[in-house]
Amino acid sequence: KERIEQLESENDRLDSLLNLYKAAVYLEKGQYVQSADIARGLEAADYNGDDRTLYDEVYGNAMDKAADSIYTIGLNLYNQQEYQGAIDNMAKVEQYNPDFVELGRCYYIMGRSYFELGNAEKAIELYEHIQRDIPSFTNTTGLLYYTGKAYQKLGDFEKARELYNLLITNYPDSSLVGNARDRLREME
């Protein structure tokens, strides 16, 4: 029985190494999502020495590159007006890299996509998440304008006016000021 346990333990160790090397190969081939998916199933404590160095390198690089790859796909789908595909991809980015530099933009694109698909409530939820939880997001004028549009679509004209006026007052040089004025005239 002791010998069986020893062999099973050795088999687990070899499986763990095999998976690490698979993740490394996928990473090297540019198949970042596949590499990251394998890497997410690995345990850092299973590796020592050079294998631990390889684990750290593969895990970090695979997650970063997978997030970037999925973000790029989502952005391309959004630009092609494939809104559901954009949402599906942007929603995965944070799973691979919660510190992704464009995370705020992921949520912004998802909000814009939900709006285009007719779900203004979800768009507002995502815009408010950005305002509340992602202070690094800098497109304040876009947030104000598109949140206003979503409230306008829902018939909350008071909130929409408030956001449009905030945009006009605080960011008079924004390219969205003219659009905000147009939306205000629509509600007169």
Image (cartoon, grey):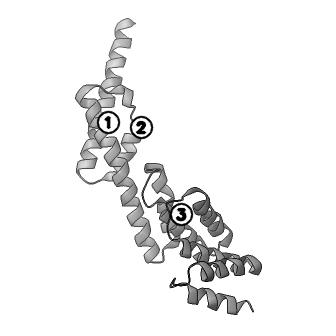
Name the residue rendered at 29%, 31% in the picture: 52
Q: Which tag, 3 or 1, sits closer to the chain's start? A: 1
Label 2 neighbour load within 10 Å: few <14, some 14-19, many 20+: few
Q: Secondary structure at mark 2?
A: loop
Res. 33 in view = no
Amino acid bearing label 1: Asn
Per the model, the C-alpha gap separating discs 2 and 3 is 26 Å
Q: Which tag, 2 or 1, sits closer to the chain's start? A: 1
Which residue is labeled 2 in the image?
Answer: 41
Label 3 neighbour load within 10 Å: few <14, some 14-19, many 20+: many
Name the residue rendered at 23%, 30% in the picture: 50
Q: Position of residue 19 (x, y in %)?
A: 32, 36
Which residue is labeled 1 in the image?
Answer: 19
Which residue is labeled 3 in the image?
Answer: 107
Amino acid bearing label 3: Tyr
Q: Position of residue 45 (x, y in %)?
A: 38, 26
Per the model, the C-alpha gap separating discs 2 and 1 is 9 Å
Question: Which is closer to the viewer, label 3 or label 1?
Answer: 3
Name the residue rendered at 27%, 48% in the picture: 27
Q: Position of residue 4 (x, y in %)?
A: 36, 12
Res. 21 in view = yes
Q: Nearer the viewer, residue 70 or 174?
A: 174
Asked if the residue at tag 3 contacts the one at tag 2, i.e. Cβ–Cβ closer than 8 Å, the answer is: no
Asked if the residue at tag 1 contacts the one at tag 2, i.e. Cβ–Cβ closer than 8 Å, the answer is: yes
